[in-house]
Image: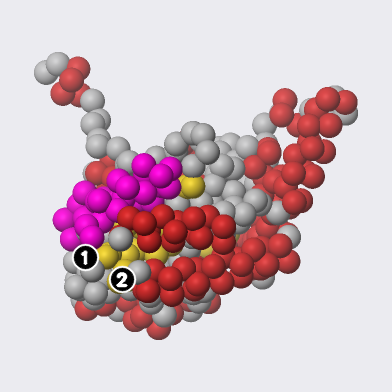
Amino acid sequence: MSWEDKIRKVVPYVAGEQPSGKVIKLNTNEFPYPPSPMVATRLYDMAQDEIDASDNMLRKYPNMDADKLVRAISQVYDIDYDKIFVGVGSDDVLAMAFLTYFNSDKPILFPDITYSFYDVWAEVFRIPYEQKPLDDNFFIKKEDYIGKDCGGIIIPNPNAPTGVLEDVAFFEDIIKNNPDCIVIIDEAYIDFGGKSALPLIDKYDNVVIVQTFSKSRALAGLRIGMAFSNPKLIKYLKDVKFSINSYTMNYPAIEIGTVSMLDTEYFNKTVNMLIKTREETKAELKELGFKFADSKSNFIFATHEKVPAREIFTKLKERNIYVRHWNKPRIDNHLRISIGTDEEMHTLIEALKEILN
Ligand SMILES: *Cc1c(COP(=O)(O)O)cnc(C)c1O
């Protein structure tokens, strides 16, 4: 056996492009507004501390539990400290959750059209999985997740890239009917008009909710994600995390994450701005002949009645407007358009009018 045969090989996750230069970037669901102004203030103060050498925090290991950040989340969400876990973006939180909670010979279940990282983690961790097809209108069929004797379940709400939101009762049914496996709800986009399933963590012992600072808190570059569950499941998650790397949350992330979390006023203001722009964009896209399931996220997953998605994608790119297109069955005639600022969306709509004429 050669060393080639002894290596763990995976097909990695492919993220949206990060072009440089002046482009309109509506392809990776980043928040279009800057993070809370408290973030820049805290960064400046931290730099001053290092310059003065009054407090060389970067010299030392950070707090393992990211204590300050977790206390801020606990305060703002009004959730007990020991029901909260933080990681390096929700991708890290989800990867740790797969490793911790999905450890049986039974397949885990998730939709066929969903966040394309799930099958990558399942492959890398050698977790068997089954992808359950969405219906033709991109809705999750609840019965696919009930009475299946599975190894676990993961579903985003709203789903990505479809943007379709389900209500809490939908998930409660799935959780209640699968008492012997862990159900993870990936709420990366829940702040854009959905209702979180967070109350369910006190009602059932088999549910984990995952959220992120990357979308609604405008901090994709900082990498902070969080999980909420009962103290027992959070403890298991921490045990696995600390067995791989005890200091995942770096000092700047803890400090900046804390001030961002505490600035609820700015958070509410900017999220509402985004929702307003999304609703206006929906109306304009409809007028141009686009069809889409109603979105409660910060993106719209649309198809045009006449012009192929691939063609629109290419022509937008020629105009330095980036949206997301996948060459995958069932969704290759759709575009995922992230919601930008009003000005960016205006430019997009004008470009679409030209392209579609
Ligand atoms: C963006 C996204 C994430 C991961 O975001 P992080 O930047 O790693 O926090 C997780 N799940 C879904 C469905 C997403 O769209």
Q: Are marks 1 and 2 in contact (CB under 8 Å)?
A: yes
**Nearer to me, 108 or 166:** 166
Looking at the picture, does residue 62 appear above or below residue 321?
Answer: above
Looking at the picture, does residue 15 appear above or below residue 52?
Answer: below
Q: CA distance from mark 1 to mark 2?
A: 8 Å
**Residue 221 image offset from top left, x and y in percent:** 56, 42
Give the magenta part as a residue range: 307-332
Residue under the point 23% across and 25% down: 7
Q: Is residue 120 left or right of residue 73?
A: left
Q: Earlier in the sequence, mark 1 or mark 2?
A: 2
The image quarter in which residue 246 lies: top right
**Residue 33 image offset from top left, x and y in percent:** 62, 54
- On-image quarter of the C terminus: bottom left
Residue under the point 72% across and 25% down: 59
Residue under the point 44% across and 59% down: 350
Residue under the point 37% across and 74% down: 287
- On-image quarter of the N terminus: top left
Cβ of mark 1 under 8 A from ligand 1: no
Was residue 314 drawn as part of the magenta stretch in this picture?
A: yes
Say how the picture is coloured: secondary structure
Mark 2 crowd level (few <14, some 14–19, many ≥20, 10 Å Cα): some
**Nearer to me, 154 or 176:** 154
Q: Disc 1 designates what residue?
A: 306
Q: Disc 2 designates what residue?
A: 289
Q: Is residue 117 left or right of residue 33?
A: left
**Nearer to me, 47 or 354:** 354
Residue furthest top in the image: 2
Was residue 245 drawn as part of the magenta stretch in this picture?
A: no
Q: Secondary structure at mark 1?
A: loop
Q: Amino acid at mark 1?
A: Lys
**Residue 45 image offset from top left, x and y in percent:** 82, 38
Q: Amino acid at mark 2?
A: Gly
